[in-house]
Image: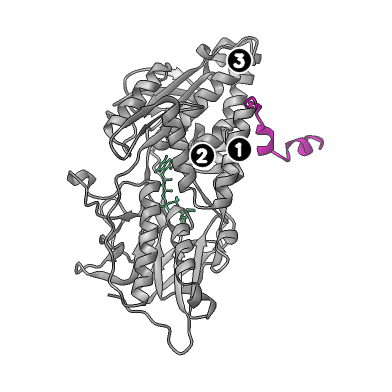
């Protein structure tokens, strides 16, 4: 057990790396549990996160569809963590042997001089990043779907393609503008495709020369099933629903090339598409490679069921816990070796964060650590307005409207801020009362272009 006490009036320094689902929720819980100590100056919590907010990813697809205001799926860290120190910066290295991290506060894309930050207790929660592949043309023409910026950009891009297809006289250009390819059929790919297809179907009604049937949606998945994070039954339901909506789902197929916006698939098909969305899974945050923490073969931090990081001798490494997508946490309910560790999803991240905070507080008081026992996951996916598929904890299956309501209720409950819950609820009510907004605001992504056009060419 880790007993940690403040000595000689020095506060215990708790450092949290990452302010996403796991990091922010752990900070929130620690802030409540340790409030007397924080206020008495006996402990301090520092959260290091490159963005000044948490992004609640499960609702990004609804941002892309325009059902939720982008600002409402992010939770400002400084507002919800008033008793913590929030640093808008990136951890570049962790040296747990000497209990130090290095932090770089330079804006994204710039490299600053990392400064050293010592700590006593460490929470590792930097999540995961998109798993890209060296496919010709992908870097030039692909888009990701893991941030608010990408969700808004994708919405604008899809609506721009409808404008383009309606206005051009070139049939080849029209065809490629109306072809939308998503690679990877996990949460991100399925959710984004289903919501955007639904939105574009509605938007097409506003064009004199377009119908929903002119639009072609292709979902490419390398494995033999979709939604690997969910139960096989829910995945099968979702697949049936997508095919019902004429989505061309290609299982056991890969993208081989996207050069010049011509998609070449491993099944031999070849077609032009101006939209390529890459959502083919995640890998642990690259930061983990620059640490002295033990990693498993997939690059996740090896953890005990108590979320303490596993030392080389099989005992916990003192003073360090990990949670969320970056952590290999044993799943006691696992049936096979392949699923022996918790899957990367928001349900595990939030539940692990709560336990992590309790275990860290327990270590401060020399109380025993509690192992993580995940509740049965409640699976659901929104597939557009008033469409969804869901499983209940008791094993029931729902589709259509009821599944969609259940899905929304679950995410509303999980969204880690009361303020944000109210705002998202208000967005949904307004979206239900009025027609959908389907205008592209792509120009906001290039705010200087009008101004620059005013200068004579050099
Ligand atoms: C589009 C999309 C849809 C999803 N839908 C669902 C869903 O429907 N249901 C579900 O259960 N799960 C879903 N997920 C998965 C879920 O969002 C993740 O499993 C969950 O967010 C993991 O929480 P986390 O805290 O580990 O990582 P994150 O929430 O990603 O947080 C990690 C944080 O660490 C920060 N960070 C990274 N590197 C550093 C560094 N070097 N220094 C400091 N900070 C760093 C990042 O900026 C980030 O804010 C979805 C994911 C995506 C992308």
Asked if the residue under mark 2 is in contact with the one under mark 1, i.e. CB atoms within 8 Å, the reply is no
Q: Is residue 325 left or right of residue 75?
A: left
Residue 114 x, y percent position in the rendering? 52, 67
Q: Is residue 457 magenta?
A: yes
Labels 1, 2: front one: 1
Judge by depth and name the residue closer to the eye, 36 or 115. Answer: 36
Distance between the alpha carbons at the discs numbered 2 and 3: 24 Å
- Residue picked out by circle 2: 60
Question: Which of marks 3 and 1 precedes in the sequence?
Answer: 3
Task: Please name the predominant secondary structure of the magenta segment in the image.
Answer: loop
Mark 3, secondary structure of its residue: loop
Residue 68 percent location from the top left of the image: 58, 37
Left or right, residue 338 beside residue 210: left
Snapshot quadrant of residue 382: top left
Question: Closer to the camera, 9 or 267?
Answer: 9
**Does the residue at mark 1 contact the one at mark 3 (Cβ under 8 Å)?**
no
Question: What SS does tag 2 mark?
Answer: helix
Residue at x-position 60% and y-position 34%: 429
Residue denoted by label 1:
427
Q: Earlier in the sequence, mark 2 or mark 3?
A: 2
Residue located beneath label 3 in the image: 205
Q: Is residue 444 above or below residue 321?
A: above
Instruction: Report the magenta residues as a range.
Output: 434-458
Assess mark 2: CB under 8 A from ligand 1? Answer: yes
**Mark 3 neighbour class, 10 Å CA radius: few under 14, some 14 to 19, many 20 or more:** few
Was residue 21 drawn as part of the magenta stretch in this picture?
Answer: no
């Amino acid at each position: 057990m880790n007993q940690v006490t403040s000595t000689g009036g020095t506060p215990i320094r708790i450092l949290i790396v990452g302010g996403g689902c796991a990091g922010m929720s752990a900070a929130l819980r620690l802030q409540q549990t340790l409030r007397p100590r924080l206020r008495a100056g006996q402990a301090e919590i520092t959260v290091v996160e490159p963005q000044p907010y948490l992004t609640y990813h499960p609702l990004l697809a609804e941002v892309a569809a325009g059902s939720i205001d982008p600002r409402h799926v992010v939770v400002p860290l400084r507002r919800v963590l008033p008793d913590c120190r929030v640093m808008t910066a990136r951890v570049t290295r962790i040296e747990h042997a000497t209990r130090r991290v290095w932090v770089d506060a330079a804006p994204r894309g710039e490299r600053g001089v990392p400064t050293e930050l010592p700590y006593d207790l460490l929470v590792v929660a930097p999540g995961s990043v998109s798993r890209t592949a060296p496919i010709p043309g992908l870097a030039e023409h692909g888009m990701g779907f893991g941030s608010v910026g990408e969700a808004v950009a994708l919405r604008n891009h899809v609506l721009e393609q409808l404008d383009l297809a309606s206005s051009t006289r070139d049939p080849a250009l029209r065809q490629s503008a109306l072809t939308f390819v998503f690679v990877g059929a996990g949460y991100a790919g399925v959710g984004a495709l289903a919501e955007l297809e639904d939105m574009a179907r509605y938007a097409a009604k506003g064009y004199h020369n377009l119908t929903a049937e002119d639009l072609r949606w292709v979902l490419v998945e390398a494995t033999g099933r979709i939604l690997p994070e969910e139960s096989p039954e829910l995945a099968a339901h979702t697949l049936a629903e997508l095919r019902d909506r004429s989505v061309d789902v290609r299982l056991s197929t890969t993208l081989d090339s996207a050069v010049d916006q011509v998609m070449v698939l491993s099944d031999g098909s070849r077609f032009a598409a101006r939209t390529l969305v890459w959502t083919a899974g995640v890998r642990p945050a690259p930061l983990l490679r620059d640490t002295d923490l033990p990693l498993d073969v997939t690059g996740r931090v090896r953890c005990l069921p108590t979320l303490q990081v596993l030392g080389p001798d099989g005992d916990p490494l003192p003073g360090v816990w990990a949670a969320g997508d970056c952590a290999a946490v044993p799943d006691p309910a696992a049936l096979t070796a392949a699923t022996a560790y918790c899957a990367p999803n928001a349900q595990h991240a939030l539940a692990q964060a709560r336990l992590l905070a309790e275990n860290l507080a327990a270590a401060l008081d020399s109380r025993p650590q509690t192992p993580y026992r995940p509740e049965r996951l409640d699976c659901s996916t929104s597939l557009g307005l008033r469409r969804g598929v869901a499983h209940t904890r008791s094993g029931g299956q729902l589709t259509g409207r009821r599944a969609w309501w259940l899905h929304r209720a679950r995410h509303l409950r999980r969204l880690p801020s009361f303020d944000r819950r109210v705002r998202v609820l208000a967005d949904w009510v307004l979206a239900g009362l009025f027609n959908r907004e389907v205008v592209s605001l792509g120009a906001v992504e290039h705010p200087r272009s009008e101004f620059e056009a005013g200068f004579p060419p050099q």
